[in-house]
Amino acid sequence: MSARSTQAETTIQSDALLQRVVELCQGRKAENIKVLDVRELVEYMDYMVIATGRSGRQNRAIAEHVLTELKRGHRVMPLSKAGMDAASWICLDFVDVVLHIFDPDSRDHYDLELLWGDAESVAVPTPATSEADDA
């Protein structure tokens, strides 16, 4: 876990948190989910999750779902959240895992995958293993 973990005192380890964030994004039909392992590059987070929604409305739905389920199921709250109003780029900082949800144009414009090109890509689990988050 990163040095910032002690600040948040979460009840879930970063690998498990990463898995849950990805599952929750998949449950709301996020597209093109990428996970970057940034532990070798920075000390303030372990993983970056980048996902795309088809619209601001879907981006908000994905973000709200992640926020609600992590709070309810794991008592995990974000250290910070940004972009919920405009929803073209939403950032949820869960200390060890930072989630970026973009609309397609914003994702292309900011191109975090290129910016963080030195980070190792992590395989994203298939949605078939996700629980019934689609209900």
Image (cartoon, rainbow, N blue to C red):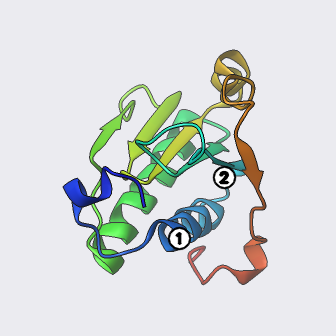
Q: Is residue 108 above or below residue 11?
A: above
For the C terminus, give its image quadrant. Answer: bottom right
User: Do we see residue 13 in this rendering?
Assistant: yes
Residue receiving disc 1: 20
Distance in Å between CA atoms under marks 2 and 1 = 14 Å
Q: Tell me: 41 left or right of 97.
A: right
Percent position of residue 37, x then y: 64, 50
Residue 106, by quadrant, is: top right
Residue type at mark 2: give it. Ala
Residue 1, by quadrant, is: bottom left
Percent position of residue 14, x then y: 47, 65
Residue 83's disc number: none
Residue type at mark 1: give it. Arg
Q: How many marks?
A: 2
Residue 30's disc number: 2
User: Do we see residue 32 in this rendering?
Assistant: no
Q: Is residue 79 above or below residue 12?
A: above
Percent position of residue 57, x then y: 51, 40
Sequence-earlier tag: 2 or 1? 1
Query: Which sits in the foreground, 27 or 2?
Result: 2
Q: Residue at x 36, y 59 (%)?
A: 67
Q: Residue furthest top?
A: 109
Q: Residue at x 51, y 53 (%)?
A: 62
Query: Which sits in the foreground, 15 or 32?
Result: 15
